[in-house]
Amino acid sequence: MLVFAGITVVSSILLCDCYMSPDSDFGPLRHPSYTEAVNFYLGKRKERICKFFVLQGLVGAGVAYTITTSKSISAIQKANCYHRKGHNANCSHDNSKHYMLLFGAVQIVMSQIPDFHNMTWLSIIAAVMSFSYAFIGLGLGLAKVIENGKVLGSMTGIPTASKTDKIWLICQALGDIAFAYPYSVILLEIQDTLKSPPSESVTMKKSSIASIMITTFFYLCCGCFGYAAFGDQTPGNLLTGFGFYEPYWLLDFANACIILHLVGGYQVYSQPAFAMVEQWFNSNYPNSQFDRNFEVKLPMLPRFEVNMFRLWFRSAYVLSITGISMLFPYFNQVLGLLGGSSFWVIGAYFPVEMFIKHKKIGVWTRTWILLWIFSIICLVLSVASFIGSVQGFINARLR
């Protein structure tokens, strides 16, 4: 966890300096998205490769958020059922696909938010909700350890039938952790919303380091206290896996916070995809009547404008993600697969290449060597996590 946090900090610092050129603090050229920065520094061919991995990461985040939301809604239903009927009651009614459809319907509406600059209120709500359920998960884990009177689990983790199975699980866990740090792909879009002075680069570096440290603290506390509380029986998700049954109202509140956080988080990771496709459409079809705003007046509502391309494309995007989520509803396996497949490319390779080009770092200099050692370490971690996650995904699919 600490290694991945450190990698994300380094990646973020490299990207922050690539937001403006030729000077990192004063520009004057700005690169307001990850793909635009890659195009400027590395050329059109690498931008196409980058777009594939960026879209994969953004779509993957949407799939993971949809699956997680359905599990949280199901957890609220189950918590109330167990509270009424007892902890041994049959409360395993699977309505997850219905909840995915419900979440998709909400996101179709939310996706009509034009861009990042109109999402301040949603980001604030998501941040507050994130802190709320993180504190609850941490507190419940600590309370369970105190109740048990001892620390469960072991240094070697969950027992497996063979060493090979253990290696597969470790590799899959690396993928899960990699997915927990998908920050790089949206960093430049966020940096583009900042005001100066001080320069956007300085502000973003400080904010990135602080946010990664806080996030890592909660990841470690929830993971360690959860394993200490339940040992080898620790569920993949503390708040939806029913390691806890009471207080049921607190579990309901925590899962409601997760849902609200994911409603906002889904949009944070969808807006770059929307912008990418809409910019492509505008550049190729500048005079299209399909990409025009129309004023709509509905009963009991004030007049508002609707962009037909935005309405149809964004709705189709959300529906596609919902469909994929319903086909592959495997939480941990999906996270590991998505994390492993794009972690190196997005989090290390392109940031390193852009930084070297931006700062004009010479080949075989000390800085050049250190940056490529960093990139190679990330590649090894990414390959291991991807292979382990593919194996876990296939096993889950065949069960």
Image: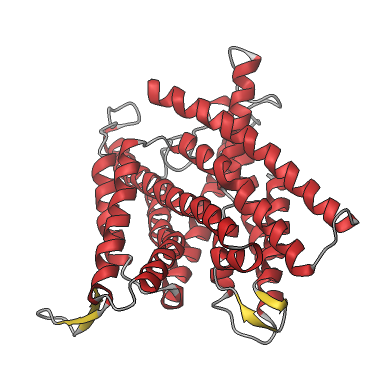
Q: Is residue 148 visible?
A: no
- Residue 139 in the image: state x and y as whole percent: 56, 48
Question: Does residue 276 sit above or below 71 in this rendering?
Answer: below
- Front in this rendered view, residue 324 or 275: 275
Relative to 81, is 200 on the left or the right? Answer: right
The residue drawn where x is 57% and y is 25% is 232
Residue ranking furthest to the top:
161
Residue furthest to the left: 299
The answer to whether residue 210 is visible is yes
Which residue appears at 33% of the width and 45% of the height?
Answer: 70
Residue 290 vs residue 172, the one in the foreground: 290
The residue lying at 73 percent from left, 48 percent from top is: 375
**Toward the viewer: 79 or 319?**
319
Question: Residue 190: percent from the left, percent from the top?
Answer: 55, 70
Q: Of 331 and 145, which appears nearest the observer?
A: 331
**Quadrant the N terminus occupies:** top right
Q: Report the quarter where the C terminus lies.
A: top left
**For this view, does 231 lie left or right of residue 107?**
right
Residue 124 horizontal/vertical position (percent):
47, 71
Instruction: Provide residue 103's location: percent of width, then percent of height.
Output: 29, 53
Seen in the picture, residue 362 relative to 301 is either above or below; the reply is: above
Quadrant hosting residue 326:
top left
Query: Is 275 positioned to the left or the right of 106 in the image?
Result: right
Q: Which corner quadrant of the image does residue 46 belong to?
A: bottom right
Q: Residue at x 32, y 47 (%)?
A: 73
Q: Give the colour scheme of this rendering.
A: secondary structure
